[in-house]
Image (tube, rainbow, N blue to C red):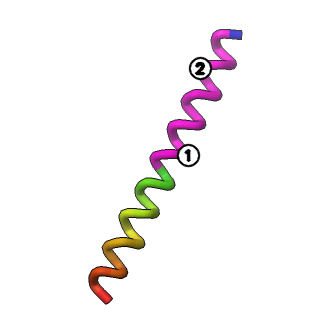
Amino acid sequence: MCNSLFSFSLISFLFFFLALITFMLAFIIIEVL
């Protein structure tokens, strides 16, 4: 159960990190254009 919770937390953190990177790239592209 603890392992499952850790896996879910890791996946959630990766999705949050990916969304943050996408937002930063979109902001940079908008600033350049």
Amino acid type for the residue under numbered disc 2: Phe
* Quadrant placement of the C terminus: bottom left
Q: Residue extending furthest right?
A: 1
Q: Which element carries disc 2, helix, strand or loop?
A: helix
Give the answer, above or below, for where 15 lies relative to 32: above
- The quadrant of the image that shows the N terminus is top right
- 9 falls in the magenta region: yes
Residue on which the image places disc 2: 6
Determine whether the residue tagged by mark 1 lies in a helix, strand or loop. helix
Q: Which region of the structure is painted magenta? A: 2-17
Q: Residue at x 55, y 46 (%)?
A: 15
The mark nearer the N terminus, 1 or 2, is 2
Q: Is residue 3 above or below residue 9?
A: above
Nearer to us in this view, 19 or 4: 19
Q: Which residue is at 36% across, 81% downward?
A: 30
Q: Name the chief secondary structure element in magenta.
A: helix
Label 1 environment density (alpha carbons within 10 Å; few <14, some 14–19, many ≥20): few
Q: Which residue is mark 1?
A: 15
In the rendered structure, the answer to whether residue 31 lies left or right of residue 19 reads left
Work out how far the residue at label 1 is from the one at label 2, CA to CA, in angstroms.
14 Å
